[in-house]
Image (cartoon, rainbow, N blue to C red):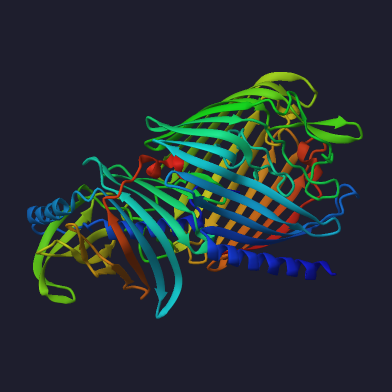
């Protein structure tokens, strides 16, 4: 049979997308405490990062189990900024390695809660674009430690927030960080909450902790190698560590290009074969 | 030279070529080695060819300028056994020119329009390659002019096919062929140089993907006629209009394909206008058995107004299947499906397995087990061809 839902290979590809989106989108999340202050901090982060319009970047995802590398994927990402507050960012992820997934495309048209994102997967072997189910938000993306939800390009409106405290930034005591909890509005979310560390100067998310539905700390993501691209800070590397299993997924970014033109064709589900 | 040794030399040669080609250009190459095992003797003693194959798939594109691209996708290889032969297939060899927001393409191309996985009613453009795939899922590139124009939320595609090509059929000696060996030259109701035309608009609106199309040209469901001492495909000139849609909600999806055909032939030789329809649904269960894996169940039904007289296999057929994806780094996947013809006494099981051995190397196995086959059914010729196919694909 050839079920049209995403295949196992497809899952891998989608996972990469999630990683990409997580890296390119300023992370958001929260927890109860000072709700108004938490929201203000995240609004400020959203305001500062607005206006990037388009970005093209190369990505590599490395899966590690212990000290050994179990898999590696390379891809190119094109992403366009949300056209309005009622929409999310759009993106197109094209895999270049390994060879057996080369040419596979994952297209995402972002939405804001309560609407789910729309996703299509193009497989060059079948020359067919397939819709991706939105019911697997908490599933592993590409067998990585990132979930589809992590990769989904969270928007400000997708969560409620609460400021917890200010303290030194993780692994960078010279910087002070806001610690903000983000509570997903979507009931299909795999998380009860996420806690973010944003530095008080540039609002860069240095660390995110993910708590599962039972409230247990499950994963920790650290972002390093931040660089300013015309006012938009982006990390060179994301490191997601599963605290339950010890497995790790590293996502590396290179060759950021902001502001290049992206045609509507490039992000059209009817043109994925081009 | 023993076939296995010769296969090895061919494989090495192709492997070396693929490595060289990949190093010089943005070219994807896949070397595929396949072997079949059949459980029974064939229906006809003439069918002495049990294929093993070595094939090389080439996919790539070359940017000739900022707006002009040459795209190609083809397969070539060698089928071993008592009646060995070389084969080739072009899926795409096309020059694509961007003109403002639109795209003008010229060359061989393959247009997959269907939403269904089983009947594929909306795939009306391309001929089929039945040589290795009796299901008709494998298509051949069709020479065409194509113009894609963004319009509203979708794309309007206009197609002109200057010289429609016929499907390709297995030789009389091959397994996995119809009961009547189709070895004669293709016959067309209108001269083969008569242009065919198609127009399609497709769009994605919210959770729905829809398409509507019209086609005038030779049918893709050839009648098999007697020409002299041989059997040959006959292509009636038809007018078709169709609609297809897929709605995806949560973990489920529903599909519909509807097609009307004028001037179609049936197996009695009569002509008629008639409808064909395919409906399907699927649902995925995520995180099964406490693992990251998922299971998708799917059901599809296909119907043709001509019923038993239709020149197509899926005229009143039900298909149910299940796929279990482990979601591991090896992309391990199991499939099982059951097909029942509700008009003929025909049914079959299909089993599949796929596993990435390492990056770029994928192992696949597929079993087709015919339970019953009605002598009146078009697929009766396959009834003794229950088989296991094992393949390895190395990509570069």
Residue B392 vs A123, above or below: the answer is below
Q: Indicate the position of residue A211 as horizontal and vertical percent values.
A: 26, 64
Q: Residue furthest front?
A: B65
In the picture, the quarter occupied by the N terminus of chain B is bottom right
Q: Quadrant of the C terminus of chain B?
A: bottom right
The picture places residue A171, in percent across and down from the top left corner, at 18, 76
Query: What residue is shown at x 43% (from left), y 75% (from top)?
Result: A69
**Whether residue B230 is visible:** yes
Q: Position of residue B306 (x, y in %)?
A: 70, 25
Q: Quadrant of residue B99?
A: top left
B329 left or right of B57? left
* Image location of residue B53, percent across then percent down: 73, 59
Q: Nearer the viewer, residue B15 or B121?
A: B15
Question: Residue B109 appears in which quarter of the rendering?
Answer: top right
Task: Please state if A76 lies on the left or on the right of B116 as rendered.
Answer: left
Q: Residue at x 72, y 25 (%)?
A: B236
Which residue is painted at 67% across and 51% down in the image? B350
Query: Which of B136 and A133 lies nearest the eye of the viewer?
Result: B136
Query: Between residues B259 and B360, which one lies in front from this camera angle?
Result: B360
Please say whether residue A273 is visible from this viewpoint. Answer: no
Left or right, B347 with reference to B363: right
Is B76 situated left or right of A52 in this image?
Answer: right
Residue in the image at 59% along x and 67% along y:
B19
Q: Residue most toward the bottom?
A: A67
């Amino acid at each position: 049979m050839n079920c049209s839902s995403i295949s196992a290979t497809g899952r891998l590809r989608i996972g990469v997308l999630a990683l990409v989106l997580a890296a390119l989108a300023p992370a958001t999340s929260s927890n109860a405490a000072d709700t108004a202050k938490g929201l203000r901090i995240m609004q400020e982060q959203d305001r500062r990062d607005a206006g990037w319009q388009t970005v093209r970047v190369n990505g590599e995802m490395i899966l590690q189990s212990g000290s050994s590398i179990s898999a590696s994927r390379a891809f190119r990402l094109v992403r366009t900024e949300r056209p309005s507050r009622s929409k999310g960012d759009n993106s197109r992820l094209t895999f270049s390695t390994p060879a057996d997934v080369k040419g596979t495309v994952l297209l995402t048209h972002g939405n804001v809660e309560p609407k789910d994102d729309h996703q299509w997967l193009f497989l060059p072997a079948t020359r067919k674009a397939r819709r991706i189910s939105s019911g697997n938000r908490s599933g592993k993306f590409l067998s990585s430690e990132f979930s589809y939800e992590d990769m989904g390009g969270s928007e400000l409106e997708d969560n409620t927030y609460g400021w917890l405290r200010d303290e030194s930034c993780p692994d960078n005591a010279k910087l002070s960080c806001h610690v903000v909890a983000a509570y997903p509005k979507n009931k299909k979310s795999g998380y009860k909450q996420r806690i973010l560390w944003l530095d008080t100067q540039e609002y860069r998310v240095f660390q995110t902790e993910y708590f599962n539905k039972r409230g247990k700390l499950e994963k920790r993501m650290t972002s390093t190698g931040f660089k300013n691209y015309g006012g938009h800070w982006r990390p060179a590397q994301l490191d997601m560590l599963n605290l339950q299993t010890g497995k790790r997924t590293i996502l590396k970014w290179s060759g950021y290009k902001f502001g290049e033109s992206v045609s509507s064709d490039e992000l059209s589900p009817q043109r994925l074969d081009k | 030279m023993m076939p296995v040794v010769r296969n090895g030399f061919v494989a090495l040669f192709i492997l070396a070529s693929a490595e060289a080609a990949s190093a010089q250009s943005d070219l994807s190459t896949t070397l595929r080695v396949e072997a079949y095992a059949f459980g029974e003797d064939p229906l006809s003693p003439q069918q002495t060819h049990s294929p093993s194959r070595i094939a090389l798939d080439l996919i790539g594109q070359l940017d000739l300028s900022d707006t002009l691209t040459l795209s190609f996708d083809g397969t070539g290889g060698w089928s071993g056994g008592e009646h060995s032969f070389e084969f080739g297939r072009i899926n795409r060899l096309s020059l694509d020119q961007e003109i403002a927001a639109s795209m003008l393409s010229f060359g061989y191309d393959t247009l997959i329009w269907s939403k269904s996985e089983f009947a594929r009613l909306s795939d009306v453009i391309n001929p089929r390659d039945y040589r290795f795939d009796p299901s008709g899922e494998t298509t051949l590139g069709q020479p065409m002019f194509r113009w894609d124009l963004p319009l509203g939320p979708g794309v309007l595609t206009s197609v002109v096919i200057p010289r429609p090509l016929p499907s390709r059929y297995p030789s009389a000696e091959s397994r996995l062929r119809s009961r009547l060996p189709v070895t004669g030259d293709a016959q067309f109701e209108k001269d083969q140089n008569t242009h065919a035309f198609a127009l399609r608009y497709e769009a994605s609106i919210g959770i729905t993907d829809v398409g509507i199309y019209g086609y005038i040209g030779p049918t893709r469901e050839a009648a098999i006629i007697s020409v002299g001492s041989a059997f040959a495909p006959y292509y009636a000139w038809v007018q078709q209009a169709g609609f297809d849609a897929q709605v995806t909600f949560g973990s489920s999806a529903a599909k519909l394909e509807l097609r009307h055909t004028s001037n179609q032939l049936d197996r009695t030789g009569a002509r008629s206008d008639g409808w064909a329809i395919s409906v399907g649904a699927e649902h995925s269960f995520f995180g099964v058995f406490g693992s990251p894996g998922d299971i998708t169940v799917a059901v599809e039904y296909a119907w043709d107004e001509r019923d038993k007289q239709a020149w197509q296999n899926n005229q009143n057929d039900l298909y149910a299947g299940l796929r279990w994806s482990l979601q591991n780094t090896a992309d391990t996947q199991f499939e099982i499906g059951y097909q029942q013809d509700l008009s003929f006494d025909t049914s079959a099981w299909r089993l599949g397995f796929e596993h990435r051995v390492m990056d770029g190397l994928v192992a696949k196995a597929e079993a087709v087990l015919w339970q019953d086959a009605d002598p009146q059914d078009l697929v009766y010729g396959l009834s003794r061809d229950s088989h296991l196919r094992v393949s390895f694909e190395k990509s570069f």
